Structures are given as C-alpha cells and as structure tokens.
Amino acid sequence: MLAAMADTIDPVRSVLVLVDYQSKLLPAIHDGARVLANAARLADAARLLGIRVVGTEENPAGLGQNDPAIRSRSNVTLAKRHFDACADGLVPILAAAERVPPADAVIAGCETHVCLLQTAMGLLAAGLRVFVVADACGSRTPRDHAAALERLRAAGAAIVTLEMVVFEWLQTCDHPKFREALGLVKEKPAGTEFRWDDASPG
C-alpha cells in the first residue's frame, strides 16, 4: 500500500468526495467555519480543473442538507443512512458517465472520526487510492480529528492538505488554469504575498 501511495494525485483519474457538511452538524464542529471554507475552496479548484465533485448527506431529514456552499458546488449529492457512504452506493456514482472510473479519491468531511473515516475506509476497500484533506475535515474535538487521521494513515490513506491537492492537480505552473487556481488557495496578506511572476518561466 505504501508503494502505491508514492505517486502524486492523478488529476485525470481523480474525484472529490465531500462528506456531510450539514447545517445541523457544522455548528458543533471544532473550527467549523474554517473547515467549511477550505472545503468550498477545494470544490472550486476541482470544478475549475474539470474534476467531478460528489457530496454526501447523512440522514438529511434529521441533520439537514449540506451547507449551500457545498451543495451548490457538487455535481451530485448522495443521501445516505450508513456512516460509510459506500454502503449506500457511493462508488458507482463517482464517475461521470462519459469518463473512465476514477482511481484517486480526494476526500474531506465531517465528522473526521465517523462518516469521513468510514467512507474513506470503504473507498480503500473498493480499491481506490484515498487522499484525506486534513484541513478541510473536522470533528467536535481536535482529539477525535487527530485520532481519525492517524488511523486512516495506518490503513493506507494519504493525509494531505488543500494546497497539496491543488498543486498536484495542476502539476505545472504552465497549466492554463494555474493563476486562477492559485488565487483559490493562496491567502495574500497585504505586502507579504509571494510573486509567482518572479518565479515562473515566461
């Protein structure tokens, strides 16, 4: 498994899965506003680069729908009852009809130690390489979040960050969407921004 994860994320064979950013759950998530904002930026980058975005909602009748920032950015949203979305049919809907099935699942969501963890485990069991975006995941307590990431790493998932994912999707500063994607991931405090014009060829 470790050898299989030595490669970077394949943008051609990627799908983004956003798990349960729901209206009645988010207020209880530690640093929930930041988690949601990072998930939305991740979805924006995926859509910019032509990568399918699949959302899930756990018992939406009880927990509400995903936040509009996530629902509006998802190509499709799966309502589920199992904590592992794969048990409710996630894998077959990961691929768009006109594309080959994805090999790399980039995943983020809430709570890290419940639905996110179990769905990531399900994707691993289905044979996908799984990349968990730590800074777009959240639990009610930092302890549960950290324990889940440790367990996922031990199970064979790669633990990554939003910026790691986007730059691996881009692969090169010559990508035609590079500057737009850069604007999504880079915070630029006045007077401190890094100038890519000075670093990139041409």
Image: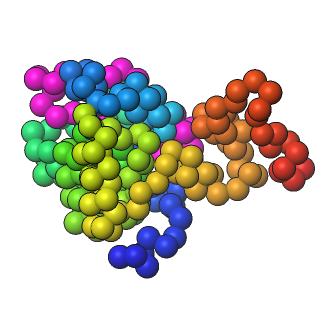
Q: Position of residue 40 (x, y in %)?
A: 45, 31
142 relative position to 41: left or right: left
Q: Above or below — where is 38 with respect to 90? A: above
- Residue placed farthest to the front in the image? 143
Residue 62 picture quarter = top left
Q: Residue 55: x and y, percent?
A: 31, 37
Give the colour scheme shown: rainbow
* Span highlighted in magenta in the image: 44-69
* Residue 80 lies within the magenta run: no
Q: Is residue 59 left or right of residue 157?
A: left
Q: Is residue 63 magenta?
A: yes
* One can see residue 92 in this view: no
What residue is at 32 percent from the left and 54 percent from the top? 149
The answer to which of 52 and 144 lies nearer the viewer is: 144
- Residue located 27% across and 67% down the image: 155
Residue at image x 29%, y 30%?
A: 29
Above or below for 194 versus 164: above
How many marks do you count on the picture?
0
Q: Can you see residue 23?
A: yes
Q: Residue at x 51, y 70 (%)?
A: 7
